[in-house]
Every structure is written in C-alpha cells, then in structure tokens.
C-alpha cells in the first residue's frame, strides 16, 4: 500500500496533495457497541485447510489478478455480511458484533464477531468464552505466511494461507486483502468459506469509472458535487452528533444528508454494556463541510485518490460499512467530509466516489 502517495482513478501513483487529517465522527450511522475482543485463548486459533472442506480449491493459486468484485452469493440466506477493510465475511444474523477492545464476554449471544486488533495482554479470557462461537477479523501480521514458502490456496477466487489451530477452529491469512481471520465453533468452516472482497475494495479498485445511470441526478453542497440516485430522499441538518459508540457499522438510512456541521449535538448516551447487534449495511451519502463532523477529531488518512479534480483521502479508522473521506476542495482551507455507505456489490459506492467533482 502506498501510504504516502495519492492514487489516480487509473491506479497510477501521483504526488500527494494535502492529505489532511481525518477521524471518526459518528453522526448518522448505526453503531455496534465497543467491548471485548480477546483472542479467545486456544479456542480461536487459526484453521487447518481441511476445515474448509469443498470451499477451498486444492490447486495452487493462479498468477493472474482476479476481478475485483463482491461475491454476494457467498452470504447464505439468513446471514449478514461483516466487512473489515478490503475483506468481508458473513455470519448468522443473530450473532453480535463489537470492535476489539477488551474481554468482557459474549453476553449470551449465539456467536460473536470482533473487528480489529485486540489490545496487548488480552490473550486470556473468562472461561465462559472457551466454547463460544466466534469470528475475529484483524490486520495482517507482517510478514505473514506468504514469506514462509507455504503455497497459497484459493477461497472464492482469493489467495489465502491457511494456519493450523485448535480442533474445530481455525482461520487464514489473506495478504491481498491485508487481513487475517480466525473462527471457532461448529459454524467455523461455513463462516470461513464466505470470504470475499468488501464493497470498499470495489469502490477503490483501479479502472474506469462506472457510467452514471440516467435515473441519478447531481447535487452540489459545501464545495463538492456528486451524483446519487434521484429516488434517494435529501435531508439537511445544521448540527452533528458523534453518536454513542466508537464503532460505525453503517449509515442509518439510504438517503442523502447535507449537514452544515455548525455545532456539536451532545446525546444522552446510556452506558454501553456488551456487544451490539449486527446491522445490514446500506447505501447512502453524508456531506459535511463544517467545523463539526466525521473529521473533527484526531486520526489519520490512508492513500488518497485523485478524482474529478479533487483529492479524496479515506480515514484509517473507519474500516467497516461506511467510507469516510477527507476531500480537499481547491481554494478551501478546510477539507469536506464525505461519507458513502458501503453495501451490496459496492458498485453504487464506486459510482458515487468516481462522480465527485468541485461544485460550480
């Protein structure tokens, strides 16, 4: 990854332009609760290739680069996709989800999804977690198994490096998506077989921009212009809220929110206990050029994208169902925050991203 570069719409590195500093506002998103994420001890060790059964090809991975797309058929009926960075896996809809921050327990859930790297020292969890069904998606540990001489296998067109773990549990490393995944419990094989690229990966994939459908229209606000489906309702607001949880999983509704971000709205948040429900991601857009918004606190941005005369830099802390961008507008000292919902195939998000232009 070109952490200090800007990538144009054709995937070519060009000099960086005002990469800005982004962060994590929480305005109009569904949030999972923050909580635990220990390694589940030995019960969530990495998986053997054989656990995946027929989902894994026994042949060596092809040398050609696969098409960048989301395999929506990998999500079984009654399950929901969970994205982290460029990767997506699916779990039963009654599982719970949280960001990796501690180890308080599964809270009686049928299964638990943890996203991100657990903090140091959380390798020993309470006994009640030993038999819990779980999925952990976290950043890839470098250099990983790809440098060990192990031959990769292919899961849904993606090269993976399998690791052996405790009986009934397992996982693999996915260098092309920058993650490693671990699963435990009776559904671990089925869950690991749902691996696919996330809508985020599709949105940022190099190549030509999709054609904007004739049923879309162009909106301008805060110095930026973009195309969205004409059927989406357009809402305006003057206040921004950080919400009540640090984990942004999805936008609330399929709509366009134009928020001036002139003041911060403090919410009476209850004490959050345990993991929260998994919510289906939705498409949508939020534009906030104001003082208060998704970019109002500390954080960094990843490799930037030059599109339509603008520089759009994704925040590095928002890796789930919302693409949060710090957009540099020519002639403006303050970057504009643009949030794009990441749902389905990711094509809608890709079309919106590639439609960004300066207003006027």
Image (cartoon, grey):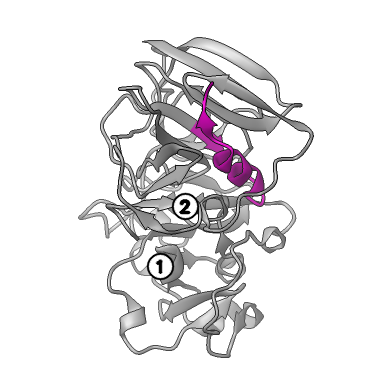
Residue 296 place in picture, x, y as percent = 32, 24
Q: Which residue is mark 1?
A: 43
Q: Label 1's element? A: helix
Quote the CA–CA distance across marks 1 and 2: 22 Å
Q: Foreground: 173 or 53?
A: 173
| 238 magenta-colored | no
**Above-or-below relation of 112 to 336:** below
The residues colored magenta run: 339-360
Crowding at mark 2 (Cα within 10 Å: few <14, some 14-19, many 20+): many
Determine the residue located farthest toward the left in the rendered image: 121
Q: Is residue 340 left or right of residue 144?
A: right
Kindly identify which residue carries mark 2: 84
Q: Are marks 1 and 2 in contact (CB under 8 Å)?
A: no
Give residue 216's position: percent from left, percent from top. 73, 32
Residue 265 shows in the view: no
Mark 1 neighbour density, 10 Å: few (under 14) some (14–19) many (20 or more): many
Q: Which mark is residue 63?
A: none
Q: Quadrant of residue 88?
A: bottom right
Residue appearing at x 66%, y 62% in the figure = 71
| Quadrant (top left/top right/bottom left/bottom right) for the N terminus | bottom left
Q: Position of residue 5 (x, y in %)?
A: 31, 52
Identify the residue at the far right of this view.
215
- Return the residue nearer the eye: 341 or 98: 341
- 313 sits left or right of 258 in the view: left
* Marked residue nearer the N-terminal end (1 or 2): 1
């Amino acid at each position: 990854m070109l952490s200090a570069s800007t990538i144009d719409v054709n995937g070519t590195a060009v000099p960086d332009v005002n990469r800005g500093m982004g962060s994590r506002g929480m305005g109009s998103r569904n949030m999972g609760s923050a909580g635990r994420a220990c390694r589940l001890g030995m019960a969530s060790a990495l998986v053997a290739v054989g656990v995946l059964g027929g989902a894994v090809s026994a042949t060596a991975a092809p040398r050609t680069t696969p098409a960048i797309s989301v395999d929506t058929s990998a999500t079984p009926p009654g399950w929901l996709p969970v994205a982290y960075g460029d990767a997506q896996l699916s779990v039963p809809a009654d599982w719970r989800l949280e960001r990796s921050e501690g180890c308080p327990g599964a809270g009686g859930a049928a299964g638990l999804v943890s996203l991100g790297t657990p903090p140091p020292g959380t390798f020993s969890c309470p006994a009640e977690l030993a038999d819990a069904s779980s999925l952990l998606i976290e950043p890839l540990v470098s250099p990983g198994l790809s440098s060990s001489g192990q031959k990769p296998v292919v899961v849904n067109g993606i090269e993976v490096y399998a690791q052996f773990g405790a009986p009934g549990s397992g996982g693999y490393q996915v260098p092309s998506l920058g993650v490693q995944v671990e699963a435990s419990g009776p559904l671990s094989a089925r869950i690991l077989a749902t691996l696919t690229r996330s809508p985020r990966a599709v949105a940022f994939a190099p190549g030509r921009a999709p054609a904007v459908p004739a049923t879309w229209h162009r909106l301008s606000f805060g110095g930026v212009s973009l195309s969205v489906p004409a059927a989406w309702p357009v809402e305006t607001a003057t206040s921004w809220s950080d919400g009540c949880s640090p984990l942004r999983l999805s936008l609330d509704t399929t709509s366009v929110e134009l928020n001036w971000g002139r003041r911060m709205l403090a919410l009476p948040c209850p004490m959050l206990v345990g993991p929260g429900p998994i919510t289906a991601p939705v498409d949508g857009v939020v534009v906030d050029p104001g003082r208060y918004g998704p970019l109002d606190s500390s954080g960094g941005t990843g490799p930037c994208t030059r599109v339509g005369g603008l520089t759009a830099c994704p925040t590095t802390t928002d890796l789930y169902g919302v693409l949060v961008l710090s957009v540099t507008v020519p002639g403006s000292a303050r970057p504009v925050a643009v949030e794009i919902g990441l749902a389905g195939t990711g094509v809608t998000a890709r079309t919106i991203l590639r439609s960004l232009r300066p207003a006027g």
